[in-house]
Image (cartoon, rainbow, N blue to C red):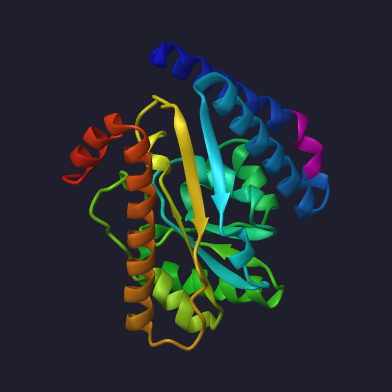
Amino acid sequence: MLLLRSLLFNLLFYANMIVLMIVGLPTMFMSRRSVFNLARVWARSSLWLLDRICNLKHEFRGLERRPVAPYIIAPKHQSTWETFALTLIFDDFSYILKRELTYIPVFGWYLWKADQIAINRSRGKTALAQAAARAQQIFADRRLLFIFPEGTRRPAGAPPKYKFGVAHLYETCGVPCVPVALNSGLFWARRSWIRRPGTIVVEVLEPIATGLEKQLFFELLQERLEVASDRLIAESVARDPSLREIVESNRHA
């Protein structure tokens, strides 16, 4: 049953995305807000499909901790799930994403219209300088910036691999940083089409104020994200002990 439900969800998830991208083409001639509204329709419909088909629910915690823009949003990245679901709790943002995503037909047009930051990761420091320059423009417009501190998805419970780019942006741009913990990888794992039942929990943590030394900020961000994400994972394992095997396997990833 798990396999059948997962297969059905995946078929409908991508069909829904394609239909919305086609129906939403007129937003290419509208404001950036129109594209964000379309993205939220995609997020809400995707979460509804997950609930109805896979019995996979979600819970947002700590929303009252969100400060006034501008600020950096630094979530854990365990799954594709957070790339669309977090659009429901943060407004008018830009992602720092790999340039190759903008080459995807139609989907890439939406990224361009939504004013996302596409960088060439292979260019190292040059790409980071480009991202910082664009980030300063975004913050000047009192918008938000998403950056996944580990750069790519990591399995739930796996040893962290943080990259220093987030600390560079924090120091260069002089805005607060909001860590976001989650446990999505337990239910929607990277490189897997299985969608497990349960509850994905997202927790907005206390913002890290401006003015910290770069290395201190980097260490504090890691500590807060890892402690909170491990706690959310432990909560899920306590409710469903079968998840323990997944976590133990991921510890060696």
Tell me what residue is drawn at x 33 percent, y 39 percent.
Answer: 238
Between residues 173 and 102, which one lies in front from this camera angle? 173
Task: Kindly tell me whether residue 76 is visible in this rendering.
Answer: yes
Look at the image and say whether residue 128 sits in the magenta stretch: no
Furthest residue toward front: 238
Between residues 221 and 205, which one lies in front from this camera angle? 205
Tell me what residue is drawn at x 50 percent, y 55 percent.
Answer: 203
Q: Position of 1 compared to 238: left or right?
A: right
Q: Position of 150 compared to 250: left or right?
A: right
Rendered view: 165 above or below 32 = below
Tell me what residue is drawn at x 51 percent, y 45 percent.
Answer: 82
Rendered view: 50 above or below 200 = above
The quarter of the picture where residue 197 lies is: top left
Where is residue 105 shown, x and y percent of the image?
A: 59, 35
What residue span does the magenta drawing correspond to?
A: 23-27
Quadrant (top left, top right, bottom left, bottom right) of the N terminus:
top left
Where is residue 58 shown, x and y percent of the image?
A: 54, 39
Q: Position of 201 compared to 125: left or right?
A: right
The quarter of the picture where residue 173 lies is: bottom right
